[in-house]
């Protein structure tokens, strides 16, 4: 870690308010920020993103980035994942993620790691109320479907490389800043240690 930090950010826009209505807020973007982030994402449809929308959308996107090749879907509510799933397609991944907790999914943020297609878009809009939907790219037909729902924000982040994200995590504290390596370790089956009397079977370990 360097002896001093010089972090440069540029204001992108003033937000309507912060975490609470009485708090003023703004969005700043890191200089030379790469694609595949909420800060640099393009808003394709819907109204302006709020402070809480941006925070929850960031949590959803960073979670779904953990999955690369297999279609994945993450649903976040109040900064916590309430559904995370893989599937043979983005629609199947969404259906599995939604099934984790349909109640909490209401009014949540949905993120995908693959292109959003018309079939999945129609399924989302038919099934639930959603605040924000995020994907690397969006089919024209899917965009047309969301354009009919002005209260739903649709974001395209662009493709991100493997191991995308910050290499160092920063956390503000009063009078200072904490820094640590980003948590990118991959947990393998060989890393697991059984501490219970009952040993999981092969299917349970895969799950």
Image (tube, helix red, strand yellow):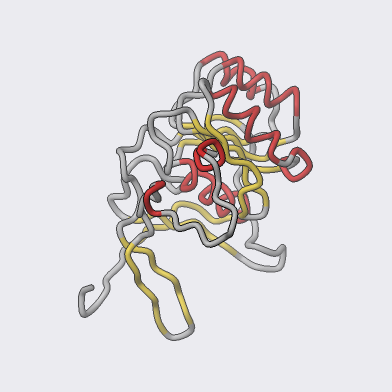
- Looking at the picture, tell me which residue is in the foreground, 199 or 96: 199
- Name the residue rendered at 43%, 36% in the picture: 157
Q: Position of residue 33 (x, y in %)?
A: 32, 49
Name, please, the residue furthest toward the right: 103
Q: Position of residue 2 (x, y in %)?
A: 20, 74
Name, please, the residue furthest toward the bottom: 175
- Name the residue rendered at 34%, 69% in the picture: 180
- Looking at the picture, tell me which residue is in the foreground, 188 or 72: 188
Name, please, the residue furthest toward the front: 197
Left or right, 187 with respect to 110, comes to: left
Residue 161, placed above or below residue 32: above
* Quadrant housing residue 18: bottom right
- Name the residue rendered at 35%, 54% in the picture: 185
Q: Position of residue 90 (x, y in %)?
A: 54, 24
- Name the residue rendered at 51%, 33% in the picture: 72
Residue 182, placed above or below residue 40: below
Q: Position of residue 142 (x, y in %)?
A: 57, 18
* Quadrant housing residue 132: top right
Residue 131, placed above or below residue 115: below
Please state, as top left, top right, bottom left or bottom right, where the N terminus lies in the image.
Answer: bottom left
Please state, as top left, top right, bottom left or bottom right, where the C terminus lies in the image.
Answer: top right
Left or right, 6 with respect to 73, comes to: left
Left or right, 202 with respect to 160, comes to: right
The total of numbered circles placed on residues is 0
* Quadrant housing residue 128: top right
- Looking at the picture, tell me which residue is in the foreground, 203 or 93: 203
């Amino acid at each position: 870690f360097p002896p001093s930090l010089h972090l440069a950010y540029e204001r992108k826009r003033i937000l309507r308010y912060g975490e609470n209505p009485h708090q003023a807020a703004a969005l700043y973007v890191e200089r030379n920020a790469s694609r595949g982030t909420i800060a640099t994402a393009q808003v394709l449809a819907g109204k302006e993103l709020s402070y809480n929308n941006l925070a929850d959308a960031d949590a959803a996107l960073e979670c779904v980035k953990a999955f690369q090749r297999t279609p994945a879907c993450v649903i976040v509510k109040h900064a916590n994942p309430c559904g995370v799933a893989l599937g043979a397609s983005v629609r199947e991944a969404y259906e599995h993620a939604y099934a984790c907790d349909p109640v909490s999914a209401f009014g949540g943020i949905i993120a995908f790691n693959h292109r959003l297609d018309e079939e999945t878009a129609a399924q989302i809009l038919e099934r639930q109320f959603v605040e924000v939907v995020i994907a690397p790219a969006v089919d024209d037909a899917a965009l047309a479907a969301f354009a009919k729902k002005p209260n739903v924000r649709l974001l395209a982040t662009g493709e991100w490389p493997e191991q995308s994200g910050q290499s160092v995590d920063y956390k503000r504290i009063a009078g200072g800043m904490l820094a640590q390596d980003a948590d990118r370790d991959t947990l393998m089956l060989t890393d697991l240690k059984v501490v219970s009397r009952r040993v999981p079977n092969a299917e349970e370990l895969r799950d």
